[in-house]
Image (cartoon, rainbow, N blue to C red):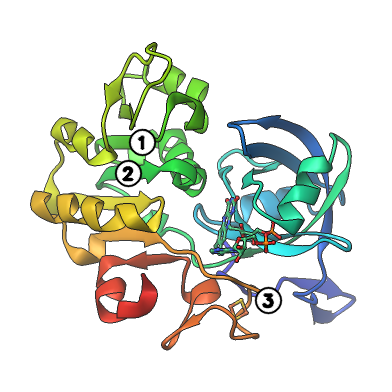
Amino acid sequence: MLKANAPKCNIRGNVVVEENPYLPERARIVRKFDLTRDVRFFQVRICDPDKVMTWTTNYKPGQFMMVSLPNAGEAPFSITSTPSRPGLFEFCIRKVGRLTSKLFELKENDYIWLRGPFGNGFPVEMMYGKDLLFVAGGLGAAPLRSVLLYALDYRDRFGKIFYLYGARTPDDMLFREEFFRMKERDDFECYLTVDADPTGLWPFDIGVVTSLFKYVNVDADNTVAIVCGPPVMYKYVVDEFLKIGIPDDHIFMTLERKMKCGIGKCGQCVVEHKYTCVDGPVFTLWDVKNIRTLI
Ligand SMILES: Cc1cc2nc3c(=O)[nH]c(=O)nc-3n(C[C@H](O)[C@H](O)[C@H](O)COP(=O)(O)OP(=O)(O)OC[C@H]3O[C@@H](n4cnc5c(N)ncnc54)[C@H](O)[C@@H]3O)c2cc1C
Ligand code: FES
């Protein structure tokens, strides 16, 4: 597996040549569809056939790509697919501004450009043998999907798995049908909640995501907890992790900062002495307590 943010190398003749980390790779949109009103799913394939497998197996869940379009800009997006299912990259993109609006205009078979993978990602090897407790809110389900699918694909490497996901309404829930299908599995526990159900048809819990902790039954000392969602949710979810007794260095969260280079050069994402693009976007609660301005 590649070291996070390590420049990729090619061997030309006998000379090892470092690839330019600012040079994007062209990828074709294979499939796209709307997950919610303003979030679209994109499945893309690297155009260079020699790079398809190396790119889609050499990344960690939790890493991100810099996605760009000529004349529209470049921005970081979490990879929502998993290296255990290589061949394609998947992204969930919320339409918020210039680049994302242009991405929403694209059709299948159009091209986008990618640099990466960047960031530290989740320490999946450290999670082997442990119970996993995932808590997602809103668009936080995008980076968590990568590590959840990874854990389910290598199910025998992990202990119990609990996945708690909260969205504002049923229509705001990403991958709703996928989660409905996953709920049928008997080798992990998936609980879904919505803040409100204007349809009156929602078959599961209603309430904030922390209300789902009543279902959790893990071995606290041997659990890794991961939270990803809007910053306002973190404090309440972390309080629940701590009530269970999960240690600070077993609690992980992904944090977002504006980014430019993605490789620790421009300083755009620096918080105190940490580069969010290289040292993050995944941090432990221990990091967050010691670098108070991270959240
Ligand atoms: C590590 C990482 C992973 C991300 N993963 C995803 C993802 O999976 N899906 C997704 O939809 N978005 C993700 N984002 C956010 C995404 O990068 C921004 O929404 C993107 O910059 C939007 O580009 P734009 O040109 O469309 O918007 P812009 O025109 O650049 O900005 C639109 C508005 O969003 C604000 N904004 C832009 N970037 C950020 C940011 N990082 N934090 C807070 N406010 C911001 C701007 O100030 C502005 O108000 C991620 C960000 C980071 C740092
Ligand atoms: S985005 Fe340039 S240093 Fe992090």
Q: CA distance from mark 3 to mark 1?
A: 31 Å
Along the polypeptide, which appears first: circle 1 or circle 2?
A: 2
Compared to residue 172, the image places residue 143 above or below, namely below
* Mark 3 within 8 Å of ligand 2, using the beta carbon: yes
Asked whether the beta carbons under mark 1 and mark 2 sit within 8 Å of each other, the answer is yes
Q: Residue at x 67, y 74 (%)?
A: 260
Ligand 1 closer than 8 Å to the CB at disc 1?
no
On residue 165, which mark appears? 1
Ligand 2 picture quarter: bottom right
Q: Residues within 10 Å of mark 2 (few under 14, many from 20)?
A: many
Q: Is residue 257 above or below residue 148?
A: below
Q: Quadrant of the N terminus?
A: bottom right
The alpha-carbon separation of the residues under discs 1 and 2 comes to 6 Å
Mark with earlier residue (3, 2): 2
Taking depth in this image into account, of 122 and 164 the one nearest to the observer is 164
Q: Which amino acid is tagged 2?
A: Val
Residue contact at pointers 3 and 1, CB within 8 angstroms? no
Q: Is 13 left or right of 127, judged from the image as shown?
A: right
Amino acid type of the residue that numbered disc 1 sits on in the rendered structure: Tyr
Q: CA distance from mark 3 to mark 2?
A: 29 Å
Instruction: Find residue 134 and report its horizontal and vertical position in percent.
Output: 32, 44
Q: Secondary structure at mark 3?
A: loop
Q: Is residue 217 left or right of residue 115?
A: left
Mark 2, residue position: 135
**What residue is shown with label 3?**
261
User: Furthest residue to the bottom?
Assistant: 273
